[in-house]
Image (cartoon, rainbow, N blue to C red):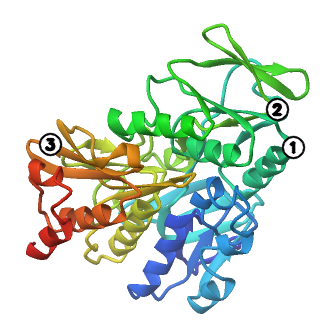
Amino acid sequence: MAVTEGASNAGTLVVGAGQAGVELAGSLRKLGASGPITLLSAEARLPYQRPPLSKAFLKGELPEERLALRGADFYAAQQIELVRGEWIEDITVTDPERGTGVATTRSGQTMVFDRLALATGGTPRRLRIPGSELTGIHYLRDIDDAVALRHDLDQARDVVVVGGGFVGLEAAAAATAAGKNVTVVEAADRLLARAVAPEVSGFYMAAHQRRGTEVVLSTEVTEILGRDRVTGVGLSDGRTIPADVVVVGIGLVPHTELAEKLGLACAGGIVVDESSRTSTPSVVAAGDCTIVAHPDHGAIRLESVPNAIAQAKTAAATLLGKDAPDAGVPWFWSDQADLKLQIAGISSGFDETVLRGDPGSERFSLFYYRGGRLVAIDAVNAPRDYMAVRKLLEAGRTVPPHVAADTEVALKELLRAA
């Protein structure tokens, strides 16, 4: 990749060095790409994993050096030029049919490319309420965010978590385990409302309450109280809750600015097809920044490591004119205290659920059906159920509802039959 004015030695430019960007660059080499590859990162650190930031890293159980996706030697060995602490200020595709173009960085350098991949990720959605700029309010997206939050939690007594999604509940679990007074405030009428069925929402609410976390539903935070630093939050029901620290987890806003400059279709994310092609087919995109049309679920955006990896591999194959690998069944996980939730499949549009096991034991699974066919599973501390169903879904098989409910039936036997 050329990085000077008037350069002609073009190569592949991958914008974004999160999970999707690193996987995409590496996949290009695996698939035989021989030209220059430049991987651009806005951060000065080596590219790293983000999911542990709200889990093991926040709790101090995982050191920073173990977060790296790859060691520095990987990029050297694969001849991938990793440009750190830099970002694209302007970008143009000069030949939409071929995908060639030129980008200008914030520091004024020029990057000429003959292939372009966007893996730009996203940023946490911000609060827009009175007091939202006070010290002590935390969002969790990068290592610096997690380090600052961990430092504040060490000295806090009262913690309010705004948002009852995965990031919010993971942070709440870590703070509660550290002996803090924690309150989760969720605007919806149940936790994890966009991801799981009411049965699983109810279980997680009860489980967090048993561990000492207070949960407030159907209520919004309307203001942050304090002068220079947060001292509490005001709620839509008129109550106030004391807080030394506020953690905000209310969703992710995809980075679509560069895509919009290129005139690519964006609708809550960069619109891509199943081959990771954007509306300019020579340009691909992958990861949290994308939204893809699914044959059964409509337009969806999957924020997960497995999806980022699968899309990245597909995008690399598309850039090289090769057949994309099978993306497999989407899967996801969340660690909250000693509860491991593993999800396989996409449950949206389900019309029936079947419970397997006893939620009171904190070890159970919920099977999702649509039109009598199994489409997804939520497994809580039930890894065998999760693995069996994931493999069955990948094989295109189903499990009759009455069999799913019978814990005497070993799912692995169904897998062997499949």
Residue position for label 1: 155
Q: Which is nearer the eye, 328 or 283?
A: 328
Residue occupying image coordinates x 33% and y 51%: 364
Q: Earlier in the sequence, mark 3 or mark 2?
A: 2
Tag 1: Cα neighbours inside 10 Å, few (<14), some, or many (≥20)?
few
SS at mark 1?
A: helix
Distance CA(mark 3)–CA(mark 2): 45 Å
Instruction: Tell me the residue at 48%/60% (across/down).
Output: 94
Q: Position of residue 18 (x, y in %)?
A: 57, 64
Regarding residue 89, the answer to whether it shows in the image is: no
* Type of amino acid at the residue the image marks with label 3: Arg
Q: Earlier in the sequence, mark 1 or mark 3?
A: 1
Circle number at residue 244: 2
Residue at screen point 69% across, 68% down: 62
Q: Which numbered marker is on residue 370?
A: 3
Q: Quadrant of the C terminus?
A: bottom left
Left or right: 377 as drawn, with respect to 159: left
